[in-house]
Image: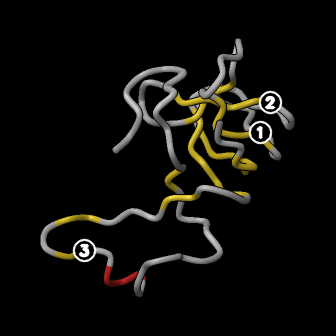
Amino acid sequence: RKSTSEYSNTVVGVCSNSYGHILGGDKLDNMEENNRKYIPIGISGRVKVKVSSKISIGDILVADSNGYAKKADRYTVGTVIGKAISNCDSGNGKVVMQIMLG
């Protein structure tokens, strides 16, 4: 499920539709089984993520309360989800992020 709090330390992956390979999965068009919706989760590599703040290359990203990523104003152990490797000039959009969970 999406994060519902800023700087959440319970994030274990990043939902993205820009993945290279699905591990333990099946065909993409068969992502629903027994009324459960399966969502591709990235745990390493580079993925596109939705952001809710202006982002510059190199910014450290954390979870926002709306389930998107946002620029970190501070660091807390276990809250970093990645580093931006592209820009987003508006407050809403997508960036490419290097996943750095931990």
SS of the residue at dot 1? strand
What is the C-alpha distance between the residues marked 2 and 1? 6 Å
Q: Are marks 2 and 1 in contact (CB under 8 Å)?
A: yes
Residue 62 percent coordinates (x, y): 61, 29
Query: Is residue 71 shown above or below 17?
Result: above
The residue wearing badge 3 is: 32
Residue occupying image coordinates x 64% and y 54%? 48
Residue occupying image coordinates x 70% and y 40%? 82
Instruction: Using residue 58 as the reference point, say whether residue 95 is left or right of it.
Output: left
Q: How many marks?
A: 3
Q: Please state which amino acid type lies under the numbered disc 3.
A: Glu
Which residue appears farthest toward the right when viewing the image?
58
Question: How crowded is the residue under tag 3: few (<14 C-alpha within 10 Å), some, or many (20+)?
Answer: few
Q: Which mark is residue 83?
A: 1
Question: How crowded is the residue under tag 1: few (<14 C-alpha within 10 Å), some, or many (20+)?
Answer: many
Q: Are marks 2 and 3 in contact (CB under 8 Å)?
A: no
Q: Please state which amino acid type lies under the numbered disc 2.
A: Asp
Question: How crowded is the residue under tag 2: few (<14 C-alpha within 10 Å), some, or many (20+)?
Answer: some
SS of the residue at dot 3? strand
Q: Please state which amino acid type lies under the numbered disc 1.
A: Lys
Q: Earlier in the sequence, mark 2 or mark 3?
A: 3
What is the C-alpha distance between the residues marked 3 and 1? 31 Å
Query: Is residue 39 shown above or below 49?
Result: below
Residue 50 percent coordinates (x, y): 56, 43
Residue 35 percent coordinates (x, y): 13, 68
Residue 27 percent coordinates (x, y): 41, 87
Q: Which mark is residue 53?
A: none
Quarter containing the N terminus: top left
The residue wearing badge 2 is: 59
Q: In this orientation, which residue lies closer to the viewer: 25 or 35?
A: 25
